[in-house]
Amino acid sequence: MHTPASLPLHEEPRADYLQKVTGTAVYASDVEVPGMLHGKILRSTVPHARIRGIDASAALAIPGVVAVLTGQDLQDLQGTEVRWGLSLRDRPVIAIDKVRYVGDPVAAIAAIDEATAEEALDAIVVDYEPLPFVTTAQEAMAEGAALVHEDMVKLKDFYFRGEALPVEGTNIFQSWQYASGDVDQAFAGAARVFEDTFTFPMVFHFAMEPHVCLAHWKPGSLEIWSGGQTPTAIQRVCSEILGVPLACVRVHSPYVGGGFGGKASVKIDPLVAALSWKARAPVRVCLSIPESMLTCRRLDAEISLKTAVDAQGRITAKSVRAVLNGGAYADTGPAIAIKAAIRAIGPYHIPNLRLEAIGVYTNTVPGAAFRSIGGPQAVWATESQMDIIAAALGRDPIEFRLANMAGKGQTIKPDLRPIDVDMRHSLRQALQALENLPEPKHEHRRGRGVAVGVSDPGIVPVGGAIVRLRADGSVNISANTVEIGQGNRGVLRIIASKVLRQPMRLIAVAEPDTLQAPYDWGTGASRSTVIIGLAVQLACEDIVRQVLETAAEVLGGSPQDYRLEAGRIEGPGEPVPIIELLRRLNGMAAGEFLGVGRVNSGTKNGDFKLAPLFWETGAQACEIEVDEGTGAIRVLRVGGAADLGHVINRKAAEGQDEGAMVMGMGHALSEEYIYEDGQVVNGTLFDYKVPTIDDAPQHVGTALIESGDGPGPFGARGGGEGAILPIAPAIANALYQGWGARIKELPLTPERVWRALQAAKAERQN
């Protein structure tokens, strides 16, 4: 059979490009249905309180208000649960007895238009009994701290494998430990031991399209158009809450205007579905950006490291304590805490390890998955400390890293798959990418820094795809992987084109729809290309087999005598159009070839049972300048490298890595939620600073390495998350290399940098 990877393929633009630039692309926020009402959410104005009562009578008296949903309504739902969660069943559809953070939904309005719904919100009166609250993880873990949740109901293997390990009677919803080797002995015998603590802020995903959902409940059925990343998770949770069988809950996933994990798992969909149930009509809820900021954010963290080195500068032991603030509801926090501890190891072979992960409830916006869960927090700490150790030992920071890196095939954590990427090669490629860039325009002193990161994607290898080869050679692909801007529909088209040898202009990818497409766990963890791409490849290979067997049956000979080409089958005789082959098979010009591809833990002879399926990595070298009068950092150039195994769409892959890098510049330089008295005080577009085009580096270069040994189609591995890992420590390391100022707290704001510069000058003078 022809080898698909060798097929020359003319690159065509992604199918969504034209739709998006012309404004014809349909996003979840564009969907309208007949009789649709508009919903608005009344949110708590206090961080922690009991709800004494809610008076919605004035709101209901406003003309055009159809329904008001409160916690009292939940007892009338037909479902088995009114609380949901991913590891802990801790989140009510809407506040029942108390509120747990400023922004917690207290009531929801359904009205004929948004203006009426807004007016009704102001008419609702809520009587609160304030309770003590905690904002930071340290406050929440202190003796006598107010409990955010009085009980913790664990869910085993619900969304992730395993279960959370909460500590009853405390605010700790995850307490996980791991050890290998003899850590204490290694510390006792070390030449040097280094201890440092680093902090990472709460940050917002800032997708251009805020959270949105349109739900239409009918007796016995529920239809949802969601801006979420995981339609099957939404389907399952809404099924449980509203008591509608899974087969009767249909979730559509139009284009999503950015997700980055903030729309992963489940967010506002159960609330909107319950509001539709109460109103007995379809209801659309589209949040504003400030409301989305009160819906979820990345977990802030305190990462404490203790690292031992021998006389030769080899790392012999490492202890990691990762404390993460999960906010008011656990969401994916239990998994994120563990990932942070593991990813703090770095791409280094360390014989003795001790890891501790702690996830904590606080009265703040719930933490959630965000591009490489736990990774930026962990890599910020580890890669900053690597430079600290190198400087103390008098070693070059690049050489020190190379000397301690795990080689390809060597273990990082003994119970995980050996690392499948040559990280030394990746770091060298990143350095070369920086050198290849044009000289930047600058007036000040420059500093250079490097950093590397690895992550073990928590991929659930469960997914499928259906592919149809039509009589005219056109192809339909049906899968539930969501297009959030990363280009997965384009990747699936390319894969099908390579295997089926049909032109891309004839290949269409359907909008995800849980009624039509096979089950998929969700879009996240860099899994779309690997899992659904592989499912599409398998489905297409099944079609090729069917076509060749049919050709042998109808035309004579054996399947090996034939090959599938554009719109035809070629073999010993004249080419036969696909439609003619079907006519001869079925006695009329009718029919199609249908293939189903499924991926599970048994795929590739059970190799998918070992975690992670692949290691996602990033290496970066950056160059900065600093305005010493203000402390403002300007990133001039960044060179990066990532081993993607096989690059399916180079332009899109480069865009994903470079976009992730700029996103990481946000938490590195400016982004953070600021809390005062339990309130977010910078929760608007005016006050929350994300990088703009003016902040982007002058020059960026990305080296995409193709080792060809990934688990996905044609040897691909996932991408798009690795580049967010190293950028913050690379910038901080450049600051130290150029100015001698070491900062252990993000973001590197001008004031923080200026103070560090003054401290460094004073230390040199002394």
Image (cartoon, rainbow, N blue to C red):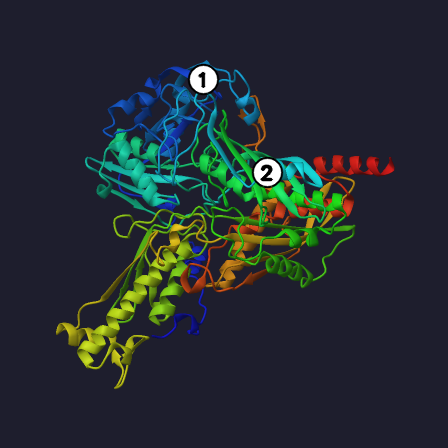
Image location of residue 248, percent across then percent down: 22, 42
Of residues 499 and 282, the one nearer the viewer is 499
Q: Is residue 109 above or below residue 370?
A: above
Residue under label 2, please give it.
183
Disc 1 crowd rating (10 Å Cα; few below 14, some 14-19, many 20+) is many
Label 2 sits on a secondary structure element that is helix
Q: How far is disc 2 from disc 1 in space, using C-alphas? A: 44 Å
Residue under label 1, please give it.
49
Instruction: Identify the residue shown where x is 31% and y is 36%.
Output: 237
Identity, as a three-letter code, of the amino acid under mark 1: Ala
View extreme (bottom): residue: 573
Pointer 2 or 1: first along the chain: 1
Instruction: Identify the residue shown where x is 27% and y is 36%.
Output: 239
**Quadrant where the N terminus is found in the figure:** bottom left
Q: Is residue 152 left or right of residue 751?
A: left
Image location of residue 505, percent across then percent down: 37, 68
